[in-house]
């Protein structure tokens, strides 16, 4: 939106900051060693933060750094990431192709900046200097609290200057998060008297007398105010010089800084004063053409005014704009304007910017500050700005929508629409409570039935996103009871209600909600409506146990969505390819899941569907867990948690935590599994769509602790609601574990109920070999039938689900050993189970199988050294070993992700593990270790 402000030191020399300069030198040295470093520079306005950044710029440039300046402005509230993009990528426009206008661009923008900084840091160390971060827009604050962690292994120095008295909650949160993640804090306090004396010598050319030093005490150690005081005395000829000293000719301190600035304004020509006053209304940096339009003069007619204010050192050049030399000067000029004048000038500024084709967000800012009633053109500008902001900073868009609503009469229908939009936007952020309170408050104002229904739809969708489907259902049912609803709104409410039923695994209720919606959808000319109907039908068919039909519909919906220009936006939000991947995991086509996930995730990223990324990682974790790739499953689950944390969304968190609990249980780390399980159940209140996953994880943890009866009781939720839908929430490879856990806990009824559901599924899906193998497996467990278990072994051997195959071998071997003693077949089955559990790194399961073999007098091999190691090269997984040499080649994380066909968040997680296992912190250290190993002839553990 605007150019970076020129780097101007606000004092003749930087005095009294030797310790801080030393700390910044040390930070530069850390980055030169390859360690990403972050420094949080805090202090009151005028304490020299900008001066320190300017000094750091000089030091960094001398050390070979690529120095990038980012300076925030009040207008940045409605220009998300503009200054950061301009600094990093050379313009305010993103470098990569943008998703369409309806996309959620938050992660997309963040990824673009990450990629650019990775590439720049490969060529030279980078210093990102951020000034006035207290003015930064929420998207930039989101980036500033996220990027230092993402780029910790790169040669990037972050120095973020922020006012210590900033009152914005998101600014405070940024500072707290950065400190919690290891950022160094530097707080600029008042200058000591000796430093103030040095400043006086710099400004006046003579040492201060004790009398002048006493006057300087009035600056409270603030260097900027001290310099302004000295300049005021000098310009007023109120300083006497004698014998190399300077003494005041008056004992009175000039009346306050604001008065001092006003006195300097009074000495300026009239046109120069008007230039500064209008500039103070336009913001920290402003365009001279806008000032000329507001004054009704040509730009050439302002040249003498520009010359006067530049000579007075009140403005500096800021690229194609002018900027106040310090924000305190702008604030002083602005605050001296009477309120009615400021309001009128903001309205004139909006008109002048509109006339000159200015940015809508900037115009909207002035309209809000002007207040009063708005005309249709102004309201159009505001609503358009809200829509554009919603793609990147939904929180700012929501605030603007609420401010615009306040400009309309209480019962204006457009006001309710703006507040409804604001609530929806707040629901996309962490401000869920605020969003729901806004919904309730607006409903209490007594809107028309259709408007209340729209508000309740927003409330329902917010509750759905938070995982509280019961509260969502309450809103949706109340909305559907309201009279005279438009048909399109009623359809949206019914679709949301049907989706809520599916989330709650109430499939019959979801089907009853249909009431002809699917049939009507297929007649629609809107492809999004058709695809939405396909996904709904696929989901209901799936949870009814018609897997082949569900898969067919899922494939058709994904194909149609993929061949539609610019993709589709379904309401409620769903992605057909993601649903297809979930359906594939439960079919005989497990191997196709990886391809669908890889292609679908890339498409979702390119379309700006950032909200879906945690779900892609979670689904990938499920598929990998089902295939027995425990290490990679854990990495994808961790990536899910990382992205969910960045997006501040919680819906996929219980699933990722449950997967991690299952992985850790299999690895033998029951304590860590319990921690993940507690986090899973605390992530979202009440029942969640991932209840079966947390129940399974809970049972596995209890069983690993030797609490068999409690483990069986943990599966009690299976008996509530639709058992088929509950079971199908888990991939087939986990179904035998449910029966086994129930039997070991003495609950034969639950095991029989699981078997009954699986038999029904086998009858319906005879073409799905995985279902038949699971049926045989459970029958073998339930009836101690070795024939059925042999059939299960044969069936599982065809579908690539190694944990299920290992379990079938173990169950067969254990049964044969218990009924017939030691036999060759029992030993062979258990040895194969031991081999498979060792290959997947399932330490706990492997040790259990080895105990069975020892009971038979057979000594089984232990876990491979790699699986048993927890640090050093031997502990690196196969996937980590693929990443390491690519880092040594100098590839960025994005390039590595593209090379390996994985997400950049997956690469980040792999590298985090590599650093931890090798006891290093940087890519430089990793590259050095790789080179040393190559020289020694050991390039693999």
Image (spheres, helix red, strand yellow):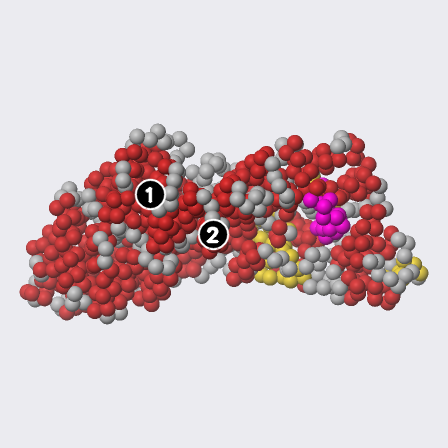
When the figure is inspected, residue 672 is found, relative to residue 73, above or below; the finding is: below
Measuring from the top left, give residue 47's x and y in whole percent: 71, 58
Mark in front: 2 vs 1: 2
Residue 846 placement, left or right of 651 = left
Mark 1 lies on a secondary structure that is: helix
638 is higher (above) or lower (below) than 113 = below
Q: Secondary structure at mark 2?
A: helix
- Magenta span main SS: helix
Image quadrant where one finds the C terminus: bottom left
Residue 119: where, in percent of width, then height?
52, 43
Asked if the residues shown at circle 2 and circle 1 are in contact, with their CB atoms under 8 angstroms apart, the answer is no
Q: Earlier in the sequence, mark 2 or mark 1?
A: 2
Q: Is residue 268 shown left or right of residue 221?
A: right
Say whether residue 876 is left or right of residue 428: left
User: Which sits in the foreground, 763 or 809?
Assistant: 763
How crowded pointer 2 is (Cα within 10 Å; few <14, some 14-19, many 20+) is rated as: few
Could you tell me which residue is drawn at 27 percent across and 46 percent down?
A: 510
Farthest residue to the left: give it: 820
Say if the magenta span includes residue 653: no
In which quarter of the view is residue 693 placed? bottom left
Task: Report x, y in % for residue 676.
Answer: 35, 62
Location of the N terminus by quadrant is top right
Front-most of residues 12 and 166:
166
Which mark is drawn over residue 444?
2
Q: Vertical placement of 486 versus 639: above or below?
A: above
Asked which quadrant contains residue 634, the reply is bottom left
Residue bearing mark 1: 494
Residue 891 visible in the displayed image: no
3D distance between C-alphas at marks 2 and 1: 23 Å
Q: Which residues are magenta?
A: 322-343
Point 34% across, 51% down: residue: 473
């Amino acid at each position: 939106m605007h150019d970076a402000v020129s780097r101007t030191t606000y004092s003749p020399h930087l005095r009294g900051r030797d310790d801080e300069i030393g700390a910044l030198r040390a930070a530069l040295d850390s980055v030169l060693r390859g360690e990403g470093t972050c420094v949080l520079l805090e202090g009151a306005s005028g304490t020299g933060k900008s001066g320190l950044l300017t000094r750091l710029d000089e030091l960094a440039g001398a050390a070979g750094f690529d120095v990038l300046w980012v300076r925030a402005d009040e207008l940045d509230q409605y220009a998300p990431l503009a200054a950061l993009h301009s600094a990093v990528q050379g313009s305010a426009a993103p470098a990569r192709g943008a998703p369409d206008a309806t996309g959620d661009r938050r992660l997309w923008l963040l990824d673009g900046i990450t990629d650019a900084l990775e590439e720049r840091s490969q060529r030279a160390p980078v210093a990102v200097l951020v000034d006035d971060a207290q003015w930064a827009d929420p998207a930039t604050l989101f980036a500033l609290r996220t990027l230092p962690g993402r780029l910790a292994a790169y040669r990037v120095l972050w120095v973020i200057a922020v006012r210590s008295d900033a009152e914005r909650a998101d600014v405070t949160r940024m500072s707290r998060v950065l400190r919690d993640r290891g950022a160094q804090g530097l707080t600029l306090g008042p200058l000591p008297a000796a430093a103030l004396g040095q400043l006086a010598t710099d400004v006046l050319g003579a040492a201060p007398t004790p009398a002048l030093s006493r006057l300087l005490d009035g600056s409270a150690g603030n260097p900027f105010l001290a310099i302004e005081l000295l300049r005021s005395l000098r310009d007023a000829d109120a300083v006497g010089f004698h014998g190399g000293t300077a003494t005041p000719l008056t004992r009175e301190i000039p009346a306050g800084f604001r008065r001092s600035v006003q006195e300097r304004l009074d000495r300026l020509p009239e046109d120069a004063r008007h230039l500064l006053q209008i500039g103070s209304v336009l913001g920290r940096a402003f365009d001279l053409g806008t000032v000329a339009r507001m004054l009704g003069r040509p730009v050439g007619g302002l040249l003498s005014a520009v010359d006067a204010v530049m000579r007075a050192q009140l403005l500096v050049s800021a690229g194609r704009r002018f900027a106040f030399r310090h924000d305190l000067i702008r604030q002083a000029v602005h605050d001296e304007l009477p309120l009615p004048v400021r309001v009128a000038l903001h309205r004139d500024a909006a008109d002048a910017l509109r006339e000159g084709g200015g940015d809508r967000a900037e115009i909207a800012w002035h309209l809000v500050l002007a207040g009063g009633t708005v005309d249709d053109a102004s309201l159009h500008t505001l609503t358009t700005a809200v829509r554009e902001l919603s793609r990147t900073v939904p929180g700012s868009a929501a605030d603007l929508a609420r401010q615009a609503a306040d400009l309309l009469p209480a019962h204006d229908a457009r006001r309710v629409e703006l507040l409804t939009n604001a609530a929806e936007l707040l629901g996309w952020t962490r401000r869920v409570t605020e969003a729901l309170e806004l919904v309730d408050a607006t409903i209490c104002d007594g809107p028309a039935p259709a408007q209340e229904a729209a508000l309740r739809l927003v409330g329902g969708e917010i509750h759905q996103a938070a995982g509280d489907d019961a509260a969502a259902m309450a809103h949706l049912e109340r909305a559907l009871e309201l009279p005279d609803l438009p048909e399109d709104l009623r359809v949206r409410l019914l679709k949301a209600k049907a989706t809520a039923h599916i989330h709650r695994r109430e499939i019959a209720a979801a089907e009853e909600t249909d009431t002809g919606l699917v049939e009507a959808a297929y007649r629609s000319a809107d492809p999004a409506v058709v695809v939405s109907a396909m996904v709904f039908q696929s989901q209901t068919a799936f949870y009814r146990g018609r897997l082949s039909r569900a898969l067919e519909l899922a494939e058709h919906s994904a194909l149609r969505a993929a061949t539609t220009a610019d993709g589709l936006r379904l309401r409620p939000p769903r992605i057909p390819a993601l649903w297809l991947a979930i359906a594939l995991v439960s079919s005989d086509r497990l191997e196709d899941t990886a391809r669908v996930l890889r292609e679908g995730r890339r498409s979702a990223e390119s379309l700006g569907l950032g909200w879906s990324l945690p779900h892609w990682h979670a689904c990938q974790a499920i598929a990998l867990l089902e295939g027995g790739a425990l290490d990679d499953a854990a990495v994808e689950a961790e990536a899910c948690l990382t992205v969910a944390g960045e997006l501040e969304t919680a819906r996929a968190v219980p699933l990722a935590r449950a997967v991690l609990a299952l992985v850790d249980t299999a690895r033998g780390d029951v304590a860590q599994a319990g921690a993940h399980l507690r986090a899973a159940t605390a992530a979202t209140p009440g029942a969640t769509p991932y209840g079966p996953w947390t129940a399974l994880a809970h049972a596995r943890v209890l069983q690993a602790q030797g609490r068999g009866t409690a483990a069986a009781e943990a599966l009690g939720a299976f008996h509530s609601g639709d058992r088929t839908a509950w079971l199908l929430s888990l991939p087939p490879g986990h179904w035998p574990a449910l029966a086994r856990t129930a039997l070991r806990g003495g609950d034969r009824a639950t095991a029989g109920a699981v078997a009954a559901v699986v038999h029904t599924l086998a009858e319906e899906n005879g073409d799905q070999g995985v279902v038949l193998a699971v049926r045989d497996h459970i029958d073998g467990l339930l009836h101690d039938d070795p024939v059925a278990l042999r059939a299960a072994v044969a069936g599982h051997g065809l579908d690539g689900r190694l944990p299920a195959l290992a379990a079938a071998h173990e169950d067969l071997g254990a049964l044969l050993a218990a009924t017939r003693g030691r036999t060759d077949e029992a030993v062979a089955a258990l040895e194969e189970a031991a081999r498979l559990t060792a290959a997947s790194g399932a330490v706990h399961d492997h040790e259990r199988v080895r105990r069975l073999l020892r009971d038979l007098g057979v000594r089984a091999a232990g876990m491979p050294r790699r699986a048993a190691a927890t640090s050093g090269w031997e502990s690196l997984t196969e996937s980590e070993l693929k990443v390491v040499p690519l880092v040594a080649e100098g590839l960025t994380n994005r390039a590595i992700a593209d090379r390996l066909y994985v997400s950049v968040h997956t690469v980040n997680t792999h590298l985090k593990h590599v650093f931890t296992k090798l006891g290093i912190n940087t890519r430089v250290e990793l590259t050095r270790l790789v080179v040393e190993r190559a020289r020694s002839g050991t390039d693999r553990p």
